[in-house]
Amino acid sequence: MQLFSATIPPDLAEVDAIAPQLTAQAQAVLPEDRLPAFEIAVVEALTNVIRHGGLAPGQTVSIALHRTPAGIEAAITDEGPALPPDLFAPRPEEEEPDPFAESGRGIGLILMCTDGVTATREGGRNRLVLRFDG
Amino acid sequence: MITTDTHGQGICLVTPNMPRLTAATATAFKDEVVQMIDQGYDKLVIDLAEVSFVDSSGLGALVGLLKRVGTRGEIILCQPADSVMQMFRITRMDRVFRFLPDRAQALDALNAG
């Protein structure tokens, strides 16, 4: 069942505007203590697409939330170039970033904060599905 | 974007006037705090009471400030919301930053240091 759907321009301020709405939807499905992880993963994924997704002017990013038997899924689609196939491959523990690194935590956070990540290419669009079990 | 309240001995209380410290706001926040550091305020209390969400860019900005003050200065974070604290715990950055419950205790700690 779809809970929410929106399309935003590739503007980081749009992520801040939409994230509380997404978390409010997730509140009805996920336990309270899972909500920060939900918001972190979704924000990092949207930010990553906008910052690094190679979107051309006029292209957009869409996000939809679906309620599933296990919890909730967030599907993010964009019209940018194909993602590297191993972008969301599990990372060994020793690859944790330097604590004094100022960037490079986004993908690791998405992996840590979700119960599953699926990245596919469909019809010229990237589709990233983040799974959160309740 | 930030409010600053300067004290003696290079101490400055920084209040980020933003509900979210994220990719959209982190660079401007960091730049403003760096200006204070460059003026000699390298002992900082950053009061996170009004910040309800920090993403990896916000965390990166705070790390950048920590590196900027170096060993001659110090940064104490206070009043983080539970949701913000979760970000520090997930990334294990709660072991890198010093937290105190409120700005008065943080200022006392810097004055004593």
Image (cartoon, helix red, strand yellow):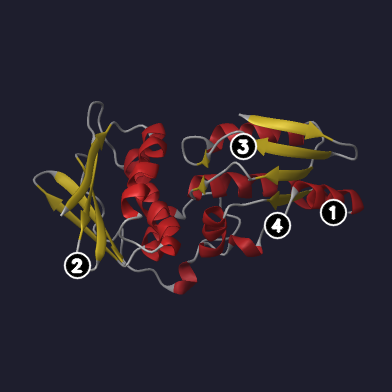
Q: Residue at x 24, y 53 (%)?
A: A128
Residue B31 location, quadrant: top right
Is tag 3's residue or tag 4's residue first in the polypeptide sequence? Answer: 3
Image position, residue A34 (x, y; %): 41, 62
Alpha-carbon distance for marks 4 and 2?
39 Å
Q: Residue at x 45, y 63 (%)?
A: A33
Q: Residue under label 1, please give it.
A: B109
Alpha-carbon distance for marks 2 and 1?
50 Å
Q: Residue at x 31, y 61 (%)?
A: A88
Badge 3: residue crowd in 10 Å (few <14, some 14–19, many ≥20): some
Front: mark 3 or 4:
4
Q: Residue under label 2, please give it.
A: A69
Identify the image quadrant of the C terminus of chain B: bottom right
Q: Secondary structure at mark 1?
A: helix
Tag 1, which chain? B
Give a yes or no on whether discs 3 and 4 share a subunit: yes
Is tag 3's residue or tag 1's residue first in the polypeptide sequence? Answer: 3
**Residue, far bottom:** A93
Q: Residue under label 4, please give it.
A: B99
Q: Nearer the viewer, residue B20 or A110?
A: B20
Residue A36 location, quadrant: bottom left
Instruction: Inspect the image, locate mark 1, and give the three-letter code of the amino acid beneath it.
Output: Ala
Mark carried by residue B12: none
Image position, residue B97 (x, y; %): 67, 57
**Image: B34 above or below A64:** above
Q: Residue under label 3, please give it.
A: B30
Q: Is residue A77 left or right of residue B45?
A: left
